[in-house]
Image: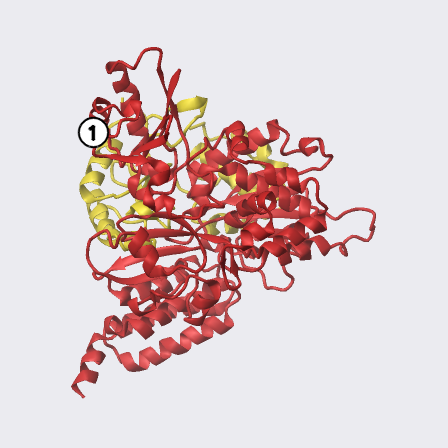
Chain colours: A red, B yellow
Amino acid sequence: MSINVYIPRDTSALAMGADDVVKALKFQTKLFHLPENKELNIIRNGSRGLFYLEPLIEVETKQGRIAYGPVTVDDVSSLLEHGILQGKTEHPLCLGLTKNIPYLAKQQRLTFARAGIINPLCIEDYLAHDGFKGLNKALTLSSQQLVDEIKNSGLRGRGGAAFPTGIKWQTVLDEKSCVKDNAKQPQKYIVCNADEGDSGTFADRLLMEADPFSLIEGMIIAGLAVGATQGFIYLRSEYPQAKIILKQAIQLAYKKHYLGQNILQSGKQFELELRLGAGAYICGEETSLLESLEGKRGLVRAKPPLPAIEGLFGKPTVVNNVISLATVPIILAKGADYYQYFGMGRSRGTLPFQLAGNIKQGGLVELAFGTSLADLVNDFGGGSYSGKPIKAIQVGGPLGAYLPQSQWHTELDYEAFANIEAVLGHGGIVVFDDSVNMAQQARFAMEFCSIESCGKCTPCRIGSVRGVETIDKIINDDNSQQNLELLTDLCDTMVDGSLCAMGGMTPFPVRSVIKHFNDDLMPTAQQQGEEI
Amino acid sequence: MPQLSTAKIQQLITQKQHLSGALLPILHNIQDQYGYIPKLALPLIAKTLQQTEAEIYGVISFYAHFRMQPTGKHIVEICRGEACQAMGSQQLEQVLKQQLNCDYGQTTKDNSITLEPVYCLGNCACAPSIKVDKKVYGRMNADKFAHLSDQLRHYTIELESTDQGVVNEQTMGKIK
């Protein structure tokens, strides 16, 4: 008999010392006598997404898994003394049954249902937790039925743009015109955008490290739906751990014939290849990503043509985010109705929100659309890490607006956010306490754009550089009123004139600072105004 | 690191040549071996892919990850993303530069550490973050870094394998 102990191999768990804890535990259990006929079996799972508790150790008991965390190397001996291996609950780090931890129990885990529960590189474990049920269902349906199912689910692109996934798939499915010989299907591609570059987001990474087969399964289903036989995962090079796990998961899926020329003896084919990016934020933009996959500089393409019509190597291509694709299996397995039951308005299903930055309890919170930012940050997040009052929250990555307290009650819904000139984006929520200078954050938005712009269009390439200069003048009280007007004009030009969201949305955080945090931007002008 | 030779580089190119859109995989393959892309590789890649050297250089220079100069023994990347800023990464950045006595894009005098900026490591709930070669460190501060950089400078850090026969390139291994 073995004692099963789970210690994650997720990037954040490793960053907080999970490997050292594993070593300490292995070493010290040799000193502590294990109960008779028992041996220690350490399973390296993915993270549950409760990053404030990492490294989180879980011990399997008859009642379920008991959690202990956050565990440091120094805690290991006292944990052993307090009977961690027997699942005893006396130690101060014991959190009780993992599934009852309120942070986890209050979530609605659909896409992340298996995260942290299974061994990410064990297909049997995946199967035991409803894995490949979606694929089995998909193999019984026609392409059009599959596309209809996704349409009915209401799933919208989780990368940030929120375009209806089913409509994108339909466009690719319908694309047959590019072949003169109608008897032959044109080559089509499924491309997974795993270039998760937004600061404050880690949902893609967590999923790929915790449950890679769900992404693979989603891609196979997408291939069946639109008639594509080749898929690519474009993964950012900043995620080396995700690379290791995905690479092995793909190999295992080939070995068990989920990938290859004859998927589960259905006669259907799907090949999958992992490709690495090279440190360019812009390659998260879908056309830039396609250029990069083709072996070029990641310059944005003008649209139209849409990638669905002329995508990778000029062929019809589905480009979907990791979370969109990894959500496809549960939609197929449980039905479109089940999925679209969650959510509000036109935002159906769940979104994995990511609590980050200056937050006490950072981590991943998957919930149906419609909850409020205040609830997330207070109930789940527990307030700021520093204990100081929260001043601003940036939602949706570097191109998302900074929200002042008056907007924290906005419902988390694509349309509700658009109404306040904000974006949900990929669900990243970055909290700042009152030590932040918002003028510097506005400046950084422009600076980031100047660093990461692909350089193809002028409003983005030059505008961002001028933006930094103009904000510097405002900060230094150099004709600040005129320069503020200039900055406002510049923002309009960038929004209206840029080719893609990089230049087109960089003004969002800047405008939000002008509108809501003007005290930081123009402290002297504010004082003068008060004097009058 | 293998010896810098035309034959070896050509072999690295040939390994990936068959892939569609092969340039990035080829560049990664070379940089993984040498730590940078030697100038010698440009004409070889260009000839193999039937492109000009200028096109190859254009691609290398577009991506922050690719470099054409050798680095120090280790690469330390400091995250400059907003989530890390919210946890004081800008102050940390200044302290680390002082400790190492070098700026971004530079290498310490003893050639042990090259310093680079990075925009998000996906560890945003445990900020501020840095990355050393392939390992991310969370909740970084000046004291922790002083200890870490001392290890990087004076000890050989070995890669080792972890559980389940899985080679974990990220594991910071035994200190010799």
Side of A174 relative to A494 (left or right): right
Residue at (52, 31) in percent of width and height: A128
Residue nearer the viewer, A198 or A490? A198
Q: Secondary structure at mark 1?
A: helix
Residue nearer the viewer, B170 or B49? B170
Residue nearer the viewer, A145 or A75? A145
Residue B143 against residue A178 in the figure, above or below: above
Residue A219, by quadrant, is: top right
Residue A303 against residue A289 in the figure, above or below: below
Residue B161 against residue A403 in the figure, above or below: above
Residue assigned mark 1: A74
Residue nearer the viewer, A412 or B6? A412
Single out the residue that lies furthest toward the top. Answer: A37
Residue A135 against residue A166 in the figure, above or below: above
Q: Report the quarter where the N terminus of chain A lies.
A: top left
Q: Position of residue A501 (x, y in %)?
A: 49, 63
Single out the residue that lies furthest toward the front. Answer: A63
Question: Chain ID for label 1?
Answer: A
Q: How many marks are shown on the rendered structure?
A: 1
Q: Position of residue A472 (x, y in %)?
A: 28, 70
Residue at (76, 55) in percent of width and height: A178
Q: Is residue B72 visible?
A: no
Q: Report the quarter where the C terminus of chain A lies.
A: bottom left
Local crowd size for mark 1, using a 10 Å CA cut-off: few (<14), some (14–19), many (≥20)? few
Q: Position of residue A244 (x, y in %)?
A: 46, 33
Q: Amino acid at mark 1?
A: Asp
Single out the residue that lies furthest toward the bottom. Answer: A532
Residue B85, by quadrant, is: bottom left
Q: Is residue A491 visible?
A: yes
Q: Position of residue A284 (x, y in %)?
A: 49, 53
Side of A436 relative to A146 (left or right): left
